[in-house]
């Protein structure tokens, strides 16, 4: 029975071509040739117009969205397809949904299906049954192949012998084992990343430091020569991959990621690379090969990276930053158990801690707890300093050693890069020497490459020279060494030193403390310090009273202003205080406005003109005018203890009672011209 009718031949024939993977495209060209040859078979069967659909080369037929297959269904649905040709059913579909959808469409419009075995009409019962069985076998075959390959991979991985790829810093040996890369520059770069992370404790800070220092990291590049190593300035993701890969801890891991299948727009969508928790890994073999770090260091690094996460909704400290509030990330509310946040005001490290989790999550109107940072930071810092004081000298020696090797890592990397650059320059020179001079085209290109390699060598030599000069300038002097040791004996002074960064203080606190639970009690804060290692300490910190703040003028200055306000106006008081070097509570010089505000806050009355006269008091120039002598004569009388006078502070005006000027002793001293004795005169001369 001839199933091909003139009606079929009036329509187009569609040849559907598909291969599942890019690996098949690269290594299985014969299958592709057989599929393209179906165009000739369609022409032999009588079709004049043959359309080839090869949009799905390199795509699986297991249910993933395929543009070519969708295009084929559209052509069948609009009636333009008379036949669909494929070498076998598995090329058209590997899942029941696509296969039966294709059969349903072909049966509705009378489109034939043709493979290498025969011609099928889906409208015929026997053909429909046979096609259904072929589709079922195709789907079953894929499941069996997948199950067989996955089980083989699992068994090989359980022995630690499955290496789908090799991480940077490792090579595969002849016995198919992992060994450290013999390239000293590659090993040094990987090791530097881990050492720098131990120092700064932040993936981002490691990446920033490497870029600032111009230190390059290796990466794999795939090209015509296969997989090679290229060097580039790192990005965050490059550093993060190195620090989170357990292979560098000498561990073999299989099953760190999985693929998640979901339905999108009616089609199966696969999301690959979904990370799993460590307890869900399929295989974990420690001490499988030589590692750059130990497994304990790896686990510590992962905890630190996890704790650095900000705005993740987790109860973690967050990354260390250089803002105010030394206990950021360590404080937990003792009332509701939530993590406390911080509000900065940008003034000398002043901030406020607050628990607003209830407000954010549940719409509560009031904050659970809130308080300033100054007193609690100082109290906890004092406890930590007391605990670490026995280790201060050891830390000082470590700081000296760190200062002396501050640029050694960069120089080592530059020297390794210079060694490689010299090798490449020598190789380019040998290639240039081998070319015949008459071959100008090749000789010119080789000469250009040689010059580029030589320029790279010169550039690296200059960078090394500059780095070595900087290293000499960073050496610690004997005076600096002595000061550092003195600070080790006085930890509070080192802690509050202007050169000490808030970021450094925070790292020290986080090294010692697990967390600090705080409760607000009447008049004070009750702290429970949870130390690393399991110990606990209870600490009470006095709360500031309403309206109280740390900017408080000393009692002596306040008393002085009280006394001066009875003698001088505000502007003159400010001048006296500034001459004496007395500053306000915030360290500012005094002005007329500041004196006026100070008086207003404390209820000190302003100086009223004529107030001294009512009390019978005179100042220096007024007393000199009344006695008809110079001001220096009056000073001599005061210094000789002949004339009684009061002075509330050096530089303040002398206060002399009017009645004292009218005494007979003062009159005789002034009239005789011998106001003072010889001893007193000497005192006055010394004063002058």
Image (cartoon, rainbow, N blue to C red):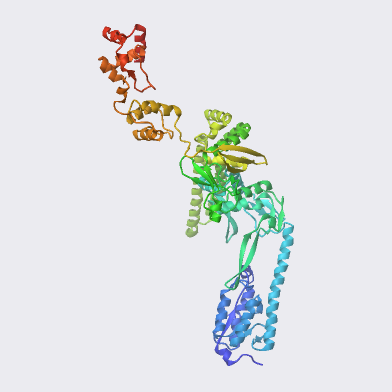
The percent position of residue 537, horizontal first and vertical second, equals 64, 38
* Residue 437 visible, this angle: no
The percent position of residue 493, horizontal first and vertical second, equals 54, 31
User: Relative to 73, does residue 147 appear above or below in the rendering?
Assistant: above
* Residue 507 visible, this angle: yes
Q: Pick the residue in front: 287 or 631.
A: 631
Q: Pick the residue in front: 354 or 50.
A: 354
Q: How many marks?
A: 0
Q: Pick the residue in front: 25 or 561.
A: 561
Q: Is residue 675 left or right of residue 558?
A: left
Residue shown at 34% from the left, 20% from the top = 655
User: Relative to 668, does residue 106 appear above or below in the rendering?
Assistant: below
User: Relative to 252, does residue 666 appear above or below in the rendering?
Assistant: above
Looking at the rendered image, the quarter that the C terminus falls into is: top left
Q: Quadrant of residue 617?
A: top left
Q: Pick the residue in front: 384 or 670.
A: 670
Q: Quadrant of residue 409?
A: top right
């Amino acid at each position: 029975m001839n199933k091909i009718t003139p009606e079929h031949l009036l329509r187009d024939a569609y040849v559907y071509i598909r291969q599942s993977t890019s690996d098949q495209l690269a290594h299985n060209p014969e299958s592709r040739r057989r599929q393209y040859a179906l165009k000739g078979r369609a022409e032999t069967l009588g079709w004049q117009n043959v359309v080839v659909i090869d949009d799905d080369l390199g795509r699986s037929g297991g249910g993933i969205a395929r543009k070519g297959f969708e295009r084929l269904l559209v052509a069948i649905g609009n009636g333009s397809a008379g036949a669909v040709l494929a070498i076998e059913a598995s090329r058209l579909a590997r899942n029941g949904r696509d296969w039966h959808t294709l059969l349903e469409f072909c049966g509705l419009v009378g489109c034939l299906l043709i493979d290498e075995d025969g011609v099928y009409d889906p409208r015929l019962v026997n053909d429909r049954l046979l096609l259904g069985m072929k589709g079922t076998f195709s789907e079953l075959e894929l499941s069996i192949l997948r199950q067989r390959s996955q089980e083989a991979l699992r068994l090989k991985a359980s022995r630690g012998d499955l290496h789908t790829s090799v991480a940077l810093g490792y090579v595969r040996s002849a016995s198919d084992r992992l060994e450290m890369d013999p390239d000293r520059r590659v090993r040094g770069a990987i090791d530097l990343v881990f050492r720098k992370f131990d120092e700064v404790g932040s993936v981002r800070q490691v990446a920033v430091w490497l870029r600032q220092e111009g230190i390059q990291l290796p990466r794999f590049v795939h090209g015509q020569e296969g997989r090679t190593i290229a060097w580039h300035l790192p990005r965050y993701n490059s550093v993060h991959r190195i620090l989170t890969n357990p292979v560098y801890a000498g561990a073999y891991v299989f099953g760190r990621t999985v693929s998640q299948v979901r339905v999108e727009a009616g089609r199966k969508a696969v999301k690959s690379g979904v990370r799993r928790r460590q307890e869900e890994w399929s295989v974990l073999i420690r001490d499988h090969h030589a590692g750059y770090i130990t497994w304990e260091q790896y686990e510590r690094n992962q905890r630190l990276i996890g704790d650095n996460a900000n705005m993740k909704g987790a109860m973690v400290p967050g990354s260390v930053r250089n803002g105010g509030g030394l206990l950021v990330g360590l404080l937990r509310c003792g009332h509701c158990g939530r993590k406390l946040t911080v509000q900065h005001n940008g003034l000398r490290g002043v901030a406020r801690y607050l628990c607003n989790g209830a407000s954010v999550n549940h719409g509560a109107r009031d904050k659970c707890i809130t308080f300033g940072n100054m007193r609690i930071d100082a109290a906890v810092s004092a406890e930590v300093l007391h605990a670490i004081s026995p280790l201060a000298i050891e830390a000082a020696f470590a700081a000296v050693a760190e200062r002396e090797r501050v640029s050694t890592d960069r120089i080592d990397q530059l020297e390794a890069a210079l060694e490689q650059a010299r090798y490449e320059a020598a190789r380019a020179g040998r290639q240039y020497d081998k070319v015949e001079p008459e071959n100008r085209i090749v000789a010119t290109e080789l000469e250009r490459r040689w010059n580029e390699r030589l320029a790279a060598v010169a550039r690296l030599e200059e960078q090394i020279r500059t780095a070595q000069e900087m290293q000499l300038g960073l050496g610690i002097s004997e005076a600096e060494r002595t000061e550092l040791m003195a600070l080790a004996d006085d930890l509070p002074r080192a802690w509050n030193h202007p050169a000490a960064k808030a970021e450094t203080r925070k790292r020290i606190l986080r090294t010692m403390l697990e967390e600090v639970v705080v409760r607000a009690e009447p008049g004070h804060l009750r702290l429970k310090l949870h130390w690393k290692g399991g110990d606990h300490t209870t600490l009470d910190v006095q709360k500031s009273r309403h309206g109280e703040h740390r900017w408080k003028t000393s009692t002596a200055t306040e008393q002085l202003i009280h006394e001066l306000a009875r003698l001088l106006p505000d502007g003159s008081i400010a001048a006296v205080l500034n001459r004496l070097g007395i500053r306000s509570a915030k360290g500012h010089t005094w002005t007329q406005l500041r004196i006026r505000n100070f008086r207003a806050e404390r209820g000190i009355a302003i100086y009223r003109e004529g107030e001294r006269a009512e009390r019978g008091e005179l100042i220096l120039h007024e007393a000199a005018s009344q006695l008809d002598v110079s001001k220096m004569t009056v000073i001599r009388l005061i210094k000789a203890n002949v004339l009684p006078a009061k002075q509330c502070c050096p530089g303040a005006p002398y206060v002399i009672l009017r009645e004292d000027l009218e005494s007979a002793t003062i009159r005789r001293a002034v009239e005789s011209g011998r106001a003072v004795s010889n001893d007193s005169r000497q005192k006055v001369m010394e004063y002058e």
